[in-house]
Amino acid sequence: MREGLVSERPARHRILIVDDEESTRLLLARILSTDLEAEVHLAGTCEQAIRLAHDYAYDAILLDLVIPGVGGRAILKDIRSGPPNDATPVVVVSVLDESATIKECMALGANAYHKKPIRRDTLVQALREQIAARRRTVALR
């Protein structure tokens, strides 16, 4: 790149994946690091998720609801309680698909809800849209 020119390559996204199933974390990490060229952080416990969400600012967070400990809903409430991720897009990825559960998650601050098993193209597109919407909102401030 020549001096004075700005790279047209988009900044790398940082995404947190929270799921107690290692195989799911690794699958999602592979998808997002490939399709979005994302830097991926992994949390397999509620405690890890809360610590990482307090220590790093993310461009998006994928969150499983059914996770031992305080559970995904409590993690979502904690994320929404203050910086650095109170406005970060949170996409819930869960086996639960009852409409009451989905409505509750949206009321708690989730930006999207995807039922497992996930469809790669649908999830990647949803994350692109959520990240782009967040960047537009930040740019308007």
Image: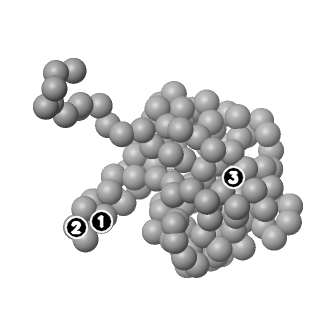
Q: Which residue is mark 1?
A: 137
The relative height of residue 103 versus residue 92 in the rendered view (above or below) is below
Distance between the alpha carbons at the discs numbered 2 and 3: 29 Å
Question: Can you say whether 45 is above or below 69 in the image?
Answer: above
Q: Residues within 10 Å of mark 2 (few under 14, many from 20)?
A: few
Residue 30 lies, in percent from the top left, at: 61, 30
Which comes sooner in the sequence, label 1 or label 3?
A: 3
Is residue 56 at all visible to an observer of this figure? Answer: yes
The residue located at (86%, 61%) in the rendering is 68
Q: Of callouts 2 and 3, which one flags the residue occurring earlier in the amino acid sequence?
A: 3
What separation in Å lies between label 1 and label 3 (alpha carbons)?
A: 25 Å
Q: Which residue is mark 2?
A: 140
Amino acid found under the numbered disc labelled 2: Leu
> What label does residue 18 carry, if any?
3
Marks 2,1: beta carbons within 8 A: yes
Mark carried by residue 120: none
